[in-house]
Amino acid sequence: MARLPYLDPADLAPENRDLLARNVNIYRAMTHSPDGTRSFLVLANYIRHHSRLDPRLREMAILQVGYATKSPYEYSHHIKIGHAFGVSDDDIRAIVAETEGRDTTLAPIEKAVLRAAREMVAGTELSDATFEALEAGLDKERIVDLLITISFYCGVVRFLGAVKIDVEDDYRQYLEAFPLPT
């Protein structure tokens, strides 16, 4: 159960109701701070709509963050979002396999993106080998966008966990199809 009550549009001042255009639990809790939510959405919208990073790679990195942190909300939501951006069920299974140290048929840049996400979940630095692997497959702008994305979602999962945001019923099916580690 969430530690903050979920707000509905009627609970907000008229000028802030647009913050719940996407009426999901993270925003319903976050809108207790309308200005904070608005600022949060600026970076979220850049990542989703303006970054030059390949959207499939972006979603794989976000899924890796969600899986590595065992964040049911993040993971379930980005399975659905990832599907819309070209992430296949085989890709999701490969994220699990890569996390467990098993070999996959993912391309070297895909493996490097997942490794970067796991390293950033675990600590504050990337290994030289991981950074070199990113440089082999991405230009500098895309590397920066990837690292911004991973950093942002490392923060998102911490907010989700701190507030104990509930997974909406519509997203539970993704956790059943692709369970998080126990």
Image (cartoon, rainbow, N blue to C red):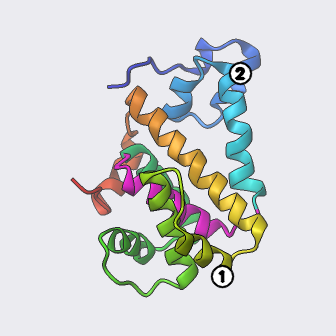
Residue type (three-letter) at the residue carrying disc 1:
Ala
Q: Residues within 10 Å of mark 2 (few under 14, many from 20)?
A: few
Q: Is residue 64 magenta?
A: yes
What is the x, y in percent for residue 68?
A: 38, 56
Residue 133 position by quadrant: bottom right
Near-viewer residue (162 or 123):
123
**Residue 94 sits in quarter:** bottom left
Label 2 element class: helix
- Against 179, residue 128 (above or below) is below
Q: Which residues are magenta?
A: 52-71
Q: Quarter of the image holding residue 161?
A: top left
Q: Nearer the viewer, residue 64 or 174?
A: 64
Mark before the other along the chain sequence, 2 or 1: 2
Closer to the camera in the image, 103 or 8: 103
Name the side, left or right, on which 182 lies relative to 151. left
**Magenta region's main secondary structure?**
helix
Query: Residue 134 location, x and y as percent?
Result: 62, 74
- Three-letter residue code for mark 2: Asp
Residue bearing mark 2: 35
Query: How far separated are the C-alphas under marks 2 and 1?
Result: 39 Å
Query: Quick check: 1 left or right of 112?
Result: left
Classify the position of the N terminus by image quarter. top left
